[in-house]
Image: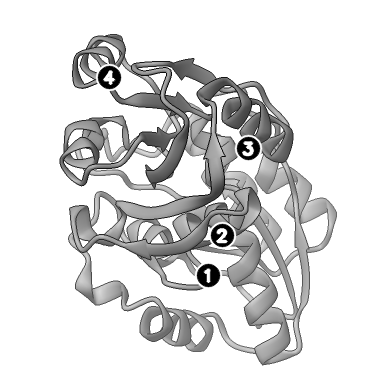
């Protein structure tokens, strides 16, 4: 059992949250009415995830995508109001870590995605707030075969833009909506770049750079960090932890 502020103070230090200029507040976004014994993790603080967490009698919900994003209307009305009312009526806390959870060297989304895909020598490049990573495949692999491997490991079929037919060996990646780092990845001399999403211009950029691009899903690439952090907190503070998967094809 641990108080919400104590748990997030630990996470703030563990994830170096103060080092990031983020698009939303990191840490305790909603303070619940009780200490935390049961922690539920998930990717996004949607109504479906909140409802599932309360059904599991969660004292706190730990997510990667929380609330209060920069530039959004701050009024808690409509669907935002429903989410907030449901969480507060359930008495649970909401804890969210965005960029700090992308970048962490062992628990972060990029590190855990590399482990899920079997990428070797995974490490941050020092670019893009630490969320652009590089590594290598165990052997040169044709683009279509690597896309098939990624689809198998993530449980969804990725979109492949084959900017080259050359077998892939050195790759770069950024989970989530990191397609905008495609040119930065190409400048690193990699054979392929993987992220979650694809924009209209991404296809043309990849082809003109002669670089393979793989869009493997924003949700699918960002499921693993929050699970790793939840497991770590459960072990550290003797909490009951469950991960809830809310399917999202995006």
Label 1 near label 4: C-beta < 8 Å? Answer: no
Mark 4 to mark 3: distance in Å? Answer: 36 Å
Label 4–label 3 contact, CB within 8 A: no
Residue at point 41%, 47% (across, down): 67
Question: 114 above or below 48?
Answer: below
Q: Badge 1: few (under 14), some or many (20 or more) residues near its Cα, within 10 Å? A: many
The residue depicted at 47 percent of the width and 30 percent of the height is 167
Marks 2/1 in contact by CB < 8 Å: the verdict is: yes
Query: Nearer the N terminus, badge 4 or badge 3?
Result: 3
Q: Quadrant of residue 177?
A: top left
For label 4, the crowd category at 10 Å Cα-Cα, with few meaning under 14, some 14 to 19 and many 20 or more, is many
Q: CA distance from mark 4 to mark 2?
A: 25 Å
Circle 4 residue: 206
Which numbered dot is residue 47? 3
Q: Position of residue 38 (x, y in %)?
A: 76, 73
Circle 1 sits on which residue? Answer: 107
Mark 3, Cα crowd under 10 Å, few <14 / some 14-19 / many 20+, is some
Q: Point out the image quarter for the N terminus.
A: bottom right
Which quarter of the picture shows residue 133?
Answer: bottom left
Query: Foreground mark, 3 or 1?
Result: 1
Determine which residue is flagged by label 2. 112
Q: Position of residue 176 (x, y in %)?
A: 42, 39
């Amino acid at each position: 059992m641990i108080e919400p502020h104590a748990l997030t103070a630990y996470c703030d230090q563990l994830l170096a949250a103060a080092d990031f200029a983020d698009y939303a507040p990191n840490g305790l976004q909603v303070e619940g009415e009780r200490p935390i014994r049961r922690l539920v993790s998930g990717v996004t603080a949607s109504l479906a995830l909140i409802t599932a967490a309360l059904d599991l009698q969660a004292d706190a919900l730990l997510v990667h995508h929380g609330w209060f994003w920069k530039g959004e209307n701050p009024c808690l009305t409509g669907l935002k109001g429903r989410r907030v009312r449901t969480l507060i009526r359930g008495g649970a806390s909401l804890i969210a870590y965005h960029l700090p959870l992308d970048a962490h060297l062992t628990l972060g989304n990029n590190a855990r995605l590399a482990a899920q895909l079997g990428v070797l020598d995974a490490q941050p490049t020092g670019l893009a707030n630490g969320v652009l990573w590089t590594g290598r495949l165990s052997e040169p692999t044709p683009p279509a075969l690597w896309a098939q491997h990624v689809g198998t490991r993530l449980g969804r079929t990725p979109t492949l833009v084959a900017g080259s037919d050359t077998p892939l060996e050195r790759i770069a990646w950024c989970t989530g909506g990191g397609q905008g780092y495609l040119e930065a990845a190409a400048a690193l001399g990699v054979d392929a770049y993987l992220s979650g999403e694809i924009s209209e211009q991404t296809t043309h950029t990849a082809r003109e750079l002669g670089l393979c691009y793989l869009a493997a899903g924003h949700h699918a690439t960002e499921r693993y960090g929050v699970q790793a952090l939840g497991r770590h907190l459960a072990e550290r503070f003797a909490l009951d932890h469950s991960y809830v998967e809310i399917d999202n094809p995006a």
